[in-house]
Image (tube, rainbow, N blue to C red):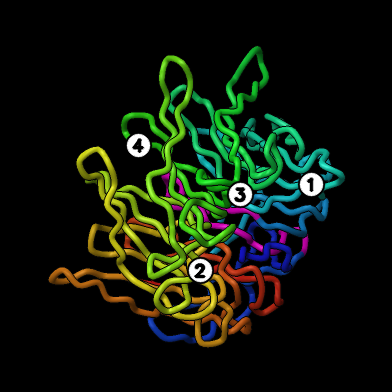
Amino acid sequence: MRPVTSIVGAVIIGGLAAGSAVPAFAHGFQVIYNFTNGADGGVPPYTLALDKKGRLLGTANQGGTEGAGIIFRMAEKKTGWFVTPLYNFNGNDGQPGWGLTLNKSSMYTVASYAEVMGGPCGSALQINQSQKQWQSVLMHTFVQKDDGCPTGNMVLDKAGNAYGVTQDGGADGWGSIYELSPSGGGWTETILYTFQGGSDGGAPYSGMIFDKAGNLYGTATARGAGGCGQGCGTVYELSPSQSGWTYKVIYTFTGGNDGGQPTAGLVFDKSGNLYGAAESFGANGGGSIFELSPSQGGWTFNLLASPSGTGGPVVALTVVSPTEIYGTNFFDGADSYGSVFRVTESGGKWTYKDLHDFTSGADGGYPGGGATLDAKGNLYGTTVLGGADKFGVIWEIGK
């Protein structure tokens, strides 16, 4: 069970604010932008990034001047929210299905091609600003039978190397972990690990994160050694050494109360604890929200909450503090079009609270991305359908 990213959404051309009336919703929820699928793009598929000036940046899967999607920036001014298209994808780029990784004056993302007989299926792009124009550099073209098809966001190290995952394909058909390194004016790919679809897991959906020591952590959605065939998944660590990288499973999901199919990426808190989510199984059928705490050279799994419904979180949580977490469910909610939730801890007990259930009407439907927190404590996110023009929305939940 994975989110659908082929539903249509859109944005208004830069310099214009969203023109439709903002309906009233509970819990401080409001739609601040309706996508139109015009030159501004459509179907915002993933989590929004926040730059140092407090502006929101994201991708739209469709629309734009080339019809293949855009990168946009959204900023709040005295008269409302304004969207500026920054970059239009074309047929050579592929279509954006994920979010952006920001680094100084550059943005990084992966895009997808239609898969044909194990051939080219995606690209990694560096988008650079030059004289107020944004131009792309092709970092790598992915081939399904060789390295797999790209998924999730890339992550950068201090030296400017980019790391990411592919969901299927590669040497064993279960995806791979790759590194793209600047070299001679271009980029060189190195495969760090190939998933085998056994006890190591396989088919990762989300990108990875670094710890302070330079180790990478991520989730793999399929298999594992927990006894539920191809459906449980793993949490893994990839550690560098002088002889290469070492892959280690630090948790295997059983498909019981701990959930299964961890499509969501991971988040560290300041104490080195990992937080994540599984989208399936669990005590109430909607997956699980969990913490992994380092303990005596290993990791201890702590179940924080068990959402109900048919599909839980598919993207990384937003950890405000060790006692306050926000996230989205892709399929869950009263109308099965997804929801926004908060999980809080008090006196050793965790409480799950539903903040908004999407209806696929004026409020949008299917939040493909997570919740982005600004400096004022406001949450922002996207849906891939619904809204005034039925091409998705950007929503806000005020503090």
* The image quarter in which residue 277 lies: bottom left
- SS under mark 1: loop
Pick whichever, 254 or 98, lies toward us. Answer: 254
**3D distance between C-alphas at marks 4 and 2:** 27 Å
Residue 332: x and y in percent read: 52, 78
* The image quarter in which residue 331 lies: bottom right
**From which residue to which does the magenta span run?**
38-59
At 60% from the left and 27% from the top, the residue drawn is: 180
Disc sitting over residue 280 in the figure: 2
- SS under mark 2: loop
Mark 2: give few (<14), some (14-19) or many (20+) Cα within 10 Å.
Answer: many
Residue topped by disc 4:
211
At label 4, the amino acid type is Asp
Residue projecting furthest to the right: 117
Q: Nearer the viewer, mark 1 or mark 2?
A: 2
Chief SS of the magenta region: loop
Left or right of residue 125, residue 77 in this image: left
